[in-house]
Image (tube, rainbow, N blue to C red):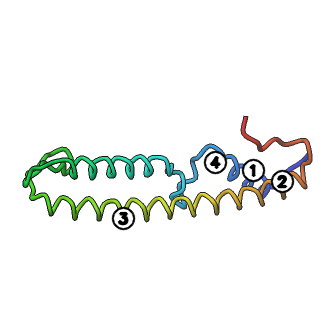
Amino acid sequence: MQETGRQQSTITEVERWRVGDHRSSGAGKKPSRTQETNENLDDAGNELILSDEDVVRFQIGEVFAHMPRDDVETKLEQMKEDAAKRLERLEGEKESILAQMAELKKVLYGKFKDAINLEED
């Protein structure tokens, strides 16, 4: 069965999304990495609660700085909020991409029937 350039482009787009390489929308990044960041921030907050130090070490990049406990608590809360917003945005992008993929697959399967396989192995 012959395919047009547009159909080939659609097939390529579905394949890119399927393998997680669709960078134009930023959705190639895995939400699980952001979930892991959230969990690490929660763990750090719990450790801070258990600590009785007034000044604690806080990692900035690859360097640890001594900071007042209150400042670290504020910074951790802000970081948690930012990570939660990012996770929510990534989940929304993922859902949008999955919906687009379903629509593209429907069009391609309508054209090529069983001659094409767009499912994951």
Amino acid at dot 2: Leu
Residue position for label 4: 16
Quarter of the picture holding the C terminus: top right
Residue type at the position of mark 1: Ile
Q: Position of residue 9 (x, y in %)?
A: 72, 54
Please tell me which of labels 1 and 2 falls first in the chain: 1
Q: Is residue 72 left or right of residue 40?
A: left
Q: Which residue is mark 1?
A: 11
Q: Is residue 39 left or right of residue 101?
A: left
| Distance between the alpha carbons at the discs numbered 1 and 4 | 9 Å
Is 67 on the left-hand or right-hand side of 59? left
Indicate the quadrant where residue 103 lies. Answer: bottom right
Mark 2 or 4, nearer chain start? 4
Residue under circle 3?
A: 81
Q: Name the spot of residue 92 as percent of width and height, x first.
A: 57, 63
Query: Is residue 47 or residue 66 the one in the foreground?
Result: 47
Q: Kindly state the secondary structure of the residue where label 3 is placed.
A: helix
Between disc 1 and disc 3, whose residue precedes? 1
- Residue linked to disc 2: 108
Which residue is found at the position 51% from the left and 59% from the top?
Answer: 90
**In the shown orientation, is residue 80 left or right of residue 26?**
left
C-alpha distance separating marks 3 and 4: 31 Å
| Closer to viewer: mark 3 or mark 2 | 3
